[in-house]
Image (cartoon, rainbow, N blue to C red):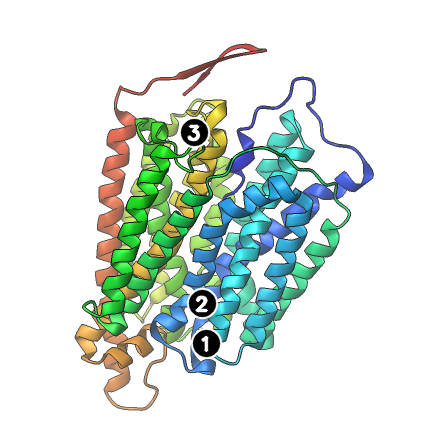
Amino acid sequence: MNSSSTSTSDEASPGMAGMALSAPSVLTLPVVLVGVALVAMSISGTAIALPNIGADLEATGSALNWVVAGYNLAFAAMTLVAGAAADRAGRRRIFIVASGVFSVGFLATAWAQSILMLDIARVVAGIGGAGVMAAGGALLASSYSGAARNRAFAFMGTMAGVGIAVGPTIVGGLISVAGWRGSFVAFAVLGALVACGAGRLQESRVDGSPTDWIGSVLSVAALGAFMLALLEGPELGWSHPLTWGAFAAGAAAAIAFAVSQRRSSAPILAPELVGQRDFMGWCLATLTTSIGFLGVLVFMPTYLQAAAGSTPATAGLIMLLLTAPVLITPVLAVALVNRGVSARVLILAALALVVVGNFGLLLLTPENTIVLIATPLLLIGIGMGTSFGITDGQAMALVPPRLVGTAAGFLNTLRGAAEALVIAVFSALLVGLLTTQLAEAGRASRVAAGDLVSSGGPEPQREIEALTSAWHFTQIVVGAACLLLSITVAMLLMSRSHRPVTIEGSEGVREFR
């Protein structure tokens, strides 16, 4: 989702500290920003619709979880491919095509008559979303330079934050007014308008830059196989041949990927970056905040509607406690760093907030829900927003110019992969724990999807208690994972072994820390 890092670290050409001023270029920034906000809203808002989709299409378990996971998997997998295609085929062309694919995917989602059709449509929409973000960032990089480029990417990051913040609320309101199908039609219409607006932008392309297609394919295969195993395992059984086969395929693809990166002339992940402690520390920091944020973002709306009895619109408003800080805190974090506050200390504080917030969600109950979870949600949101504001800049400042593309691609792919895998693991934990408590896999999948028994008697209360208990245990696992990763980040960032990278250029010797 944060494709802005791809180009913010590019070196601007001396003497070109302005923007392209031809008439079509005037539209570049607003068109790209609307596309970015639309994609961000689609990422954060879809979870609100899951209970309604499940009830309408009689879907539960992994099939329903693929509505979100399939989109995120396609988004993560196609970001690098879309960026490479934009450089070669034309950034405007790919932006227009991607916006159209995004629109078609959402339109197909709205018309889907089965969960399988809907899941396929979501994958299509995710591919379009990846293209919008990757080509949009490339358009900004090719249209602006110097200070104007920095401002353009600052706006891009802000609009991504806006989309994340208001996505659940807007989708919840649309569902209340037009149903879940109507909400997806709205996204399809907006995607088509973005594609039309992009038709007046200037074209740009770069020829000759190599792309590690083998590494791209292997990374997609590894991620897809692991997600398949994690999402299907709770229902099929962890000893099922498909589950083991998927894990084995994922492991084989991951090993092949590691080997290919050492042999590739233009690897997705340069080995020298992995060996740089500070860079990996910042990468693990963004991974940690994603783990602590994404599970809550995707699965909390279902709990609010199923167990706490909230309407989709109310659930969307409650989720503002988590998402609104992502709109505000990135700017504040950057301002603090610019005023001399240590970025390392700031990110460790952000990670601490994410850890405390996730453990704080152990207070979650169906009664007095908002009062009990308000502070934990705010803490997680503030931590995520702080990371969102400073992680890319600090990581990219450690990378020499010849590796900025590789490093930026790795950061964005890491985020996308984390988002996809967190959804899969969170779902597997919930369903697995519910199966243990309810002693029936089908019933566990139904409860995890928010489809609780509505008749009188003790059964509805039993299902609510089981869902709440499963949530608590899952949060313990997530909180513990974030804590261990935070300790690792602290060890990497606070060690005294980090070395600045000095680059000689037209402005003298520059030092990257």
Tell me, for residue 115, which label it has, or none: 1
* Horizontal side, residue 223 vs residue 466: left or right: right
Q: Would residue 372 be visible to someone looking at this image?
A: no
Label 2 crowd (10 A; few <14 / some 14-19 / many >=20): many
Task: For the residues labelled 1 and 3, say whether their Cβ atoms are less than 8 Å apart.
Answer: no
Of badges 2 and 3, the one in the foreground is: 2
* Horizontal side, residue 479 vs residue 381: left or right: left
Q: Would residue 264 be visible to someone looking at this image?
A: yes
Label 3 crowd (10 A; few <14 / some 14-19 / many >=20): some
Q: Which residue lies most toward the bottom here?
A: 456
Q: CA distance from mark 2 to mark 3?
A: 34 Å
SS under mark 3: helix
* Horizontal side, residue 92 vs residue 181: left or right: right
Seen at 64% across and 25% down, the residue is 146
Residue 166 image point, x, y percent: 54, 57
Q: CA distance from mark 1 to mark 3?
A: 42 Å
- Quarter holding the C terminus is top left
Seen at 21% across and 62% down, the residue is 473
- What amino acid is labelled 2 in the image? Val
Q: Which residue is mark 3?
A: 394
- What amino acid is labelled 1 in the image? Ile
Residue 48 image point, x, y percent: 47, 67
- What amino acid is labelled 3 in the image? Gln
Q: Which residue is mark 2?
A: 67
Of badges 1 and 3, the one in the foreground is: 1
